Image (spheres, grey):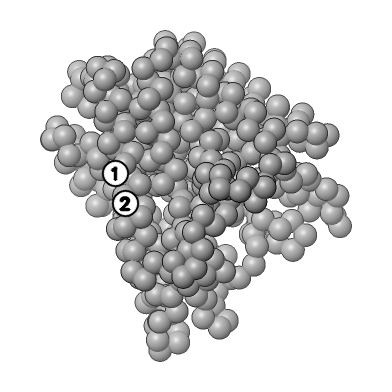
């Protein structure tokens, strides 16, 4: 989903960026397999969810923030082969392309397997698209200014949590798109904003500034990334403990110490709070500090996934959903539920009676999905490496 980095520039590709992206893409598939095959229940409810279920969901929280961050990083690194005006135009057009994919092909053939448009969820491609469009305007500013704007959006947006869209009259849909979460169009063809834009635009802008750091000499880059990652993680703990600022949902004591720990980690993703982003991006930067510029052979498959992120994304959801259709057909003799998503409670499909599998089955299916996608992703990565056609930049 991020920009293809440094193709046909004669400069070495920063493989550590691709490896980090590939890692979170693999984790993303776990979350979506759990969506389609997991047993009913809220995995983020510390009072009821098991630790295994909670962490199966929690570890996938790293996916979206890293996607957005590295989208900005890719934009910065692309400056080496594109003048500012061309880069800006590319970001805008690619952003529009992602939004179009979200609303058409991926909505119908990825998430929901229907074309009735009774419910449309505006999720990650929608938010990535608008973030790229916003960055297309911001890249005309100095890098420090873009980064500062991103930091301000991340750090300050929780100040506006008390404002409710319902209090803003005709501006309510705009506020929902920018900062809230909810319906902007009601039935019979409802549209629900799952990914409000402001904090995600901020993460993308910060990622743009990260691109300059990625180009530093290796020792200096690693040192800065490690320190920044640890500082952000420490800031999460320091701000989370007193429940003063940074997340609209405070943690609280639970029946056991372990469940209290789960409550502490249960930061708000929709929209991503300051604490959620510190909790995820801090460790991500620390991990990036450990990754070499040249990828060891053991991580070569991960690198492959990271080089073709949108291709992987567009394939993995239909594959997971199709596998659920087959499983449902085998188990029940029919699979009509898998094509029905009329309400948000039945998104992305209507669960059949008794549907759901234990976590070991979910993990096994996840591994199977990742293995099945690898040959296709390897083939397409080779195509992109051999071919510099402009249209490939949009996949």
Q: In this view, does 88 lie above or below 169?
A: above
Which residue bears the numbered disc 1?
Answer: 97
At horizontal 42% and vertical 12% (from top left) the residue drawn is 142
Residue bearing the label numbered 2: 101
**Which labelled disc corresponds to residue 275?**
none
Locate residue 104 relative to residue 386 in the image: left or right. Answer: right
Q: In which quarter of the image is residue 141?
A: top left
Q: In the displayed orientation, state which residue is furthest to the bottom.
A: 333
> Does the image show residue 304?
no
Give neighbour class at mark 2: few <14, some 14-19, many 20+ (Cα, 10 Å).
Answer: some
Kind of element beneath mark 1: helix
Nearest the viewer among 299 and 175 is 175
Do callouts 1 and 2 mark residues in contact (Cβ within 8 Å)?
yes
State the image coordinates of residue 232 (x, y, percent, origin top left): 64, 26
CA–CA distance in space, label 1 to label 2: 6 Å
Q: Which residue is drawn at 29% across and 48% down?
A: 311
The picture places residue 23, in percent across and down from the top left corner, at 44, 41
Quadrant of the rendering where the C terminus is positioned = top left
Which quadrant holds residue 77?
Answer: top left
Residue 340 seen in the current view: yes
Q: In this view, does 131 lie above or below 166?
A: above
């Amino acid at each position: 989903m991020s920009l293809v980095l440094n193709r046909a520039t004669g400069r070495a590709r920063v493989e550590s960026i691709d490896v980090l992206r590939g890692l979170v893409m693999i984790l993303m598939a776990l979350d979506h397999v759990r969506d389609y095959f997991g047993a009913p229940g809220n995995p983020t409810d510390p009072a009821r969810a098991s630790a295994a279920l909670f962490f199966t969901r929690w570890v996938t929280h790293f996916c979206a923030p890293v996607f957005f961050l590295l989208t900005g990083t890719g934009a910065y690194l692309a400056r080496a082969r594109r003048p500012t005006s061309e880069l800006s135009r590319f970001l805008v057009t690619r952003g529009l392309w992602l939004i179009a994919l979200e609303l058409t092909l991926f909505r119908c053939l990825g998430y929901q397997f229907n074309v009735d448009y009774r419910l449309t969820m505006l999720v990650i491609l929608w938010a990535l698209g608008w973030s790229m469009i916003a960055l297309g305007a911001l890249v005309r500013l100095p890098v420090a200014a873009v980064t500062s704007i991103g930091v301000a959006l991340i750090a300050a947006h929780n100040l506006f949590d008390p404002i409710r869209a319902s209090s803003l009259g005709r501006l309510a849909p705009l506020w929902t798109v920018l900062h809230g979460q909810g319906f902007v169009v009601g039935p019979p063809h409802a549209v629900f904003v799952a990914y409000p834009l402001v904090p995600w635009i901020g993460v993308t802008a910060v990622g743009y500034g990260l691109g300059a750091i990625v180009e530093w000499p290796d020792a200096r880059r690693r040192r800065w990334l490690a320190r920044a990652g640890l500082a952000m993680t420490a800031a999460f703990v320091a701000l989370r403990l007193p429940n003063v600022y940074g997340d609209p949902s405070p943690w609280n004591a639970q029946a056991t110490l372990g469940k209290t720990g789960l409550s502490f980690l249960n930061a708000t993703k929709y929209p991503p709070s300051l604490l959620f982003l510190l909790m995820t991006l801090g460790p991500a930067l620390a991990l990036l500090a450990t990754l070499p510029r040249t990828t060891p052979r053991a991580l070569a498959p991960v690198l492959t996934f990271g080089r073709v992120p949108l291709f992987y994304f567009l394939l993995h959801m239909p594959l997971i959903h199709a596998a659920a259709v087959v499983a449902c057909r085998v188990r029940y003799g029919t699979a009509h539920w898998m094509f029905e998503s009329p309400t948000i409670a039945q998104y992305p499909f209507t669960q059949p009676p008794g549907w759901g599998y234990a976590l070991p089955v979910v993990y096994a299916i996840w591994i199977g999905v990742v293995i099945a996608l690898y040959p296709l992703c390897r083939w397409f990565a080779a195509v992109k490496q051999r071919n510099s056609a402009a249209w490939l930049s949009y996949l």
